[in-house]
Amino acid sequence: MTDARLFHWEYNPPPIAHEVFRVEGGTPLRGEVTISGAKNAALKLLAAATLTGERCRFMNVPEIEDVRVMVETLRDLGVVVDHPAPNVYEVASGDVDWLFVPLEAAAKMRASFILLGPLLARFGQVIMSNPGGDRIGRRPVNLHVDAMRALGAEIDYRNGYYFAKAPGRLRGAEIRFPNVTVMGTENAMLAATLADGHTVIRPAALEPEVDDLIAMLQKMGAEVERTYPDTIEVRGRRRLRGANHSVIPDRIEAGTFVIAAAVSGGDVTLRGAPCDHLGAFLEVLANMGVQVACGANSIEVHGAPRGSGAYRACDVETAPYPGLATDLQPPTSVLLTQATGTSRLYETIFEDRLEWLGELARMGASVEIIDEHHATIVGPSRLRGTAVEIGDLRAGASLILAALAADGITTIRGAHHVHRGYENIEGKFIGLGARIERLAEGTVATPA
Ligand code: UD1
């Protein structure tokens, strides 16, 4: 097979349109699962490659829908993206044809907005659609736009598009964010690597994926470093070079499998799992009495028998890293349904990330949504299979977890959301003994 694109499709077929997961719950998961590369690192690394005309090579890239969308968006710009082997991507952006990121790309994936900084810094102009992405809150991009303006860019907003220009070169600046923003930090940092002069970004997000991006940029010759935990400083260069980089493991995928083992009463070893990046999450699990052991490059989980009520309730609050990741709040909520007592949830980052708990309640969880940031969960609940619907990526994976812990059969509509961020999720669960199938909608009977 010579055509890299064909290779890609053979390896990882696109999701079936309007598909459902059908999960038969109650089997304790057992065995080993290998954690893939981090979505939230890979997408930014692919974007960073547009900062140079030289070839960049990435290993351990997850084969997920969001990566496919990013690759397609880059190719539409005229960037050459090769996919010579599974999980390996090569990007060469010698020149681009078209400095325009259309609504089609932006609506599929909010992270396409990460192209603003690098394209503006390298080519001096870009037109970007206002992004859509997950339905989890308002998700504005004002902080990205403000950061580019601080670096000297002129940006107009008309008819849903940002028209951005950098007359001459971007200029180094002091960028102050009113709150921690992961992609805002990354966009500012990417743009500053080619700006004229010194940039200070504060508060800079502390997420491990930001540090992975810093590591890649340093290999490309950028002068960028974290001078204090919450401060990133950049001295702009005229030119960057190509580099090779292996993506860090996905801490959110790892957390998802940890919970899968815990709620199914299984024994699972996660290979290539980043314990170091899961501190706050593992602390919650320790407080709840889940047996988790960290190795150098692995995590072992020994779940209590399903329905035993052996886990303890715990109050949970999300926060920017090193706090508990908002992306791990939905999986953690599933675990809380299996804990004895009342747990309070405080989602501090996004406004709509508790809505999906309504679907969990339909499976028998005792959940009260107090407002857009607060909920309580009383457990333990005996979950039962029913028909539910996925509204966003993390909630989708969490409904699979709930289905694994439930009695009977659950059908989960809207599986495409899950493929945005999880590589071969049903294959990995099947490898652990789960009874899960991915089917086209209409071929599966809906449980009563
Ligand atoms: C990233 C992650 C996402 C994760 C989130 C928080 C990627 C691709 N996505 O999203 O998985 O859930 O961090 O850890 O890396 N905000 C504004 N204006 C802006 C930007 C953000 O008001 O211009 C607000 C957001 O609405 C939110 C908060 O800032 O309330 C933090 O969001 P941010 O860290 O920017 O999230 P993302 O980088 O979009």
Image (cartoon, helix red, strand yellow):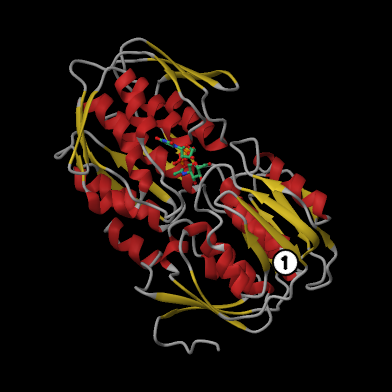
Query: Which amino acid does the dot numbered 1 rest on?
Result: Val
**Does residue 307 appear left or right of residue 107 in this picture?**
right
Dot 1 crowding, Cα within 10 Å, few <14, some 14–19, many 20+: many
* Residue identified by numbered label 1: 263
Q: Is residue 288 above or below residue 28?
A: above
- The answer to whether mark 1 is within 8 Å of ligand 1 is no
Disc 1, SS: helix
Q: Is residue 161 above or below residue 137?
A: above
Residue 297 is at least partly visible in this image: no
Residue 327 is at least partly visible in this image: yes
Where is residue 309? Give x, y as percent: 83, 68
**Does residue 320 appear left or right of residue 132 in this picture?**
right
Q: Is residue 81 above or below residue 228?
A: below
Q: How many marks?
A: 1
Where is residue 445? Give x, y as percent: 48, 90
Query: Which of the 4 quarters of the picture holds residue 140?
Result: top left
Question: Which quadrant: the N terminus?
Answer: bottom left
Where is residue 259? Give x, y as percent: 68, 60
Query: Which of the 4 quarters of the picture holds residue 408?
Result: bottom right
Q: Residue at (65%, 40%) from the top-left corner?
A: 277
Can you name the residue that lies furthest to the front here? 370
Query: Which of the 4 quarters of the picture holds residue 343?
Result: bottom right
* Along the line of sight, the residue nearer the viewer: 281 or 149: 149
Q: Residue at (62%, 75%) from the top-left corner?
A: 363
Where is residue 229? Give x, y as percent: 60, 22
Question: Which quadrant: the C terminus?
Answer: bottom right
* Along the line of sight, the residue nearer the viewer: 128 or 141: 141
Q: Residue at (17%, 43%) from the top-left corner?
A: 159
* Along the line of sight, the residue nearer the viewer: 249 or 164: 164
